[in-house]
């Protein structure tokens, strides 16, 4: 299983970025996919998730600004981030929960850095 995140960069407050996670090794339409982030000096926190059934949830601080989606043609999970704020500065990680026979398995991408200047 490989999760390859890309799309991070340095932007100004109010700008937009689109993160992409290229997924290989799993049928990600059958698994729950998500994004987490870790700010400098902070702990990794949940950002957004799209389940295998298509249910979507977000952490409260990004509601109305971020949109998670799944592109089955490109095997990617994307995070469209609008109206970025300095507080969104973090390394963003793609995450997959893959169901096994008796347990679930967690997989993480390598992270992509998003820096939002004020």
Image (cartoon, rainbow, N blue to C red):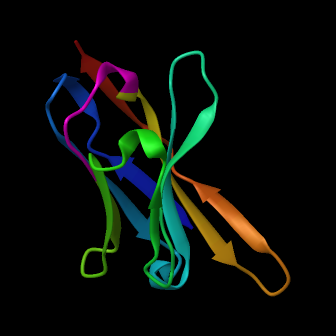
| Relative to 86, 83 lies left or right | left
Residue 65, percent from left and from top: 26, 46
Quarter of the image for residue 105 reads bottom right
| Relative to 25, 77 lies left or right | left
- Seen from this angle, which residue lies furthest top? 118
| Relative to 27, 14 lies left or right | left
- Quarter of the image for the N terminus: give it: bottom right
Q: Nearer the viewer, residue 27 or 88?
A: 88
Q: Nearer the viewer, residue 34 or 83?
A: 83
Disc count in the image? Answer: 0
- Image vertical order of residue 7 relative to residue 98, above or below: above
Residue 33, percent from left and from top: 50, 66
- Quarter of the image for the C terminus: give it: top left
Quarter of the image for residue 42 reads top right
Q: Which residues are magenta?
A: 80-87
What residue is drawn where x is 32% and y is 20%?
A: 86
Q: Nearer the viewer, residue 76 or 87?
A: 87
Q: Is residue 76 in view from this perspective? A: yes
- Image vertical order of residue 39 relative to residue 5, above or below: above
- Image vertical order of residue 28 relative to residue 35, above or below: below
What residue is drawn where x is 54% and y is 57%?
A: 95
What residue is drawn where x is 46% and y is 76%?
A: 55
What residue is drawn where x is 53% and y is 85%?
A: 30
Q: Is residue 19 in view from this perspective? A: no
Residue 5, percent from left and from top: 39, 49
Q: Is residue 27 magenta?
A: no
């Amino acid at each position: 299983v490989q999760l390859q995140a890309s799309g991070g960069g340095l932007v100004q407050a109010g700008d937009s970025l689109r993160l992409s996670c290229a997924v290989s090794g799993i049928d990600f339409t059958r698994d729950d996919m998500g994004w987490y982030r870790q700010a400098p000096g902070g702990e990794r926190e949940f950002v957004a998730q799209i389940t295998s059934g298509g249910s979507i949830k977000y952490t409260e601080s990004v509601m109305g600004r971020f949109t998670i989606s799944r592109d089955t043609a490109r095997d990617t999970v994307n995070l469209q981030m609008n109206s970025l704020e300095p507080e969104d500065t973090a390394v963003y990680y793609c995450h997959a929960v893959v169901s096994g026979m008796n347990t679930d398995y967690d997989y993480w991408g390598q992270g992509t850095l998003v820096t939002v200047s004020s």
